[in-house]
Amino acid sequence: MYIDTHAHLLDKKLPKIEEVIGNYLSVGVEKVINMACCLETARECVKMAEKYESVYFGSGIHPQDIKDVTDKDLEEIAKIATHEKCVCIGEIGLDYYWDKSYKEIQKEKLIKELEIAKALKLPFSFHSREATLDTLTLLKDNREKIEFGGVLHCFSGSKDTAREVLNLGLKLGLGGTATFKNAKYIKEVLDYAPLDSIVVETDCPYLAPEPFRGSVNEPKNIPIIVRFIASQKNTDEIEVAKLIYKNSCEVFKKLV
Ligand SMILES: [Zn+2]
């Protein structure tokens, strides 16, 4: 019924993993994509996916961790990504919020990660923070490397940005931030974006949706996000859930 397309199940802020899994399975979240942030978490993601049936994963290096990454590290990321339960390259992207000092390194290594995605015929989960223009420019300039699609995760851009993302053949990943009271953009984005362009995610343990904002987020909160989208779209919640599930399987083909 539901898929959480972007979570961080290794994060210590979460309760015990068995409890987290029990919680989400009981509300109909069938699959969760556990995103790596660095080489070490990618290795841990493999172990968790091998242990728990509902857990899949992404292999990739987050922009905050990319600075000192070597080609050899990226080779291992690519090798891990050949695992049967690795459904994407992620999370990868551009982040100018924490540190603007190595923008060029971020871009250069991101392109190498997109090359891995293409070589392995995998989609990607893309993190973009305070880097919208560079994100769109880089993706447009590297169109041939993104032919297997991907998701702009935690999308919180304008309608115009959404249009550009969809024109690139990518999907919008909506999570808890969409439900925040100050998320004025989301109404416009949801009025514009067709339902088949949307997947949902928690990015847990962060960004719990309303009315739980500020608390530890878990994949069990996915139905809240789907319900919010259905209400904004004035559409039946079950139909929206089914369609979003289908979209997730279309992007992340190794989920099925
Ligand atoms: Zn994330």
Image: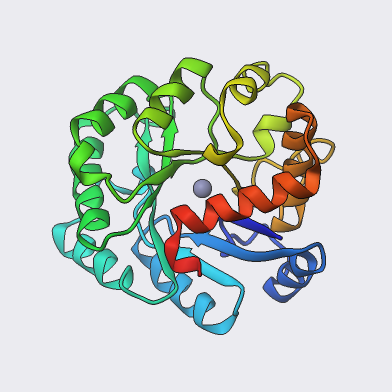
- Give the image location of residue 246, x and y in percent: 58, 54
Image point 40% across, 66% down: which residue? 42
The colour scheme is rainbow
Figure label count:
0
Judge by depth and name the residue closer to the eye, 169 or 118. Answer: 169
Q: Is residue 213 visible from the viewing direction of this image? A: no
The quarter of the picture where residue 14 lies is bottom right
Q: Which one is nearer the viewer's eye here, 121 or 110?
A: 121
For the point 20% across and 36% down, the residue is 142
Viewer-closest of 206 and 166? 166
In the rendered image of this protein, does residue 86 appear above or below residue 196?
below
Q: Is residue 148 above or below residue 63?
A: below
In the rendered view, does 201 fall on the left or right side of 250?
right
The reply, left or right, for residue 158 in relation to residue 195 is left
Q: Nearer the viewer, residue 8 or 251?
A: 251
Q: Is residue 125 left or right of residue 224?
A: left
Is residue 92 positioned above or below 119 on the image? above
Residue 206 lies left or right of residue 216; in this view the side is: left
Quarter of the view holding residue 154? top right
Question: Where is residue 222 drawn, in percent x and y?
Answer: 72, 50
Q: Position of residue 58 (x, y in %)?
A: 43, 61
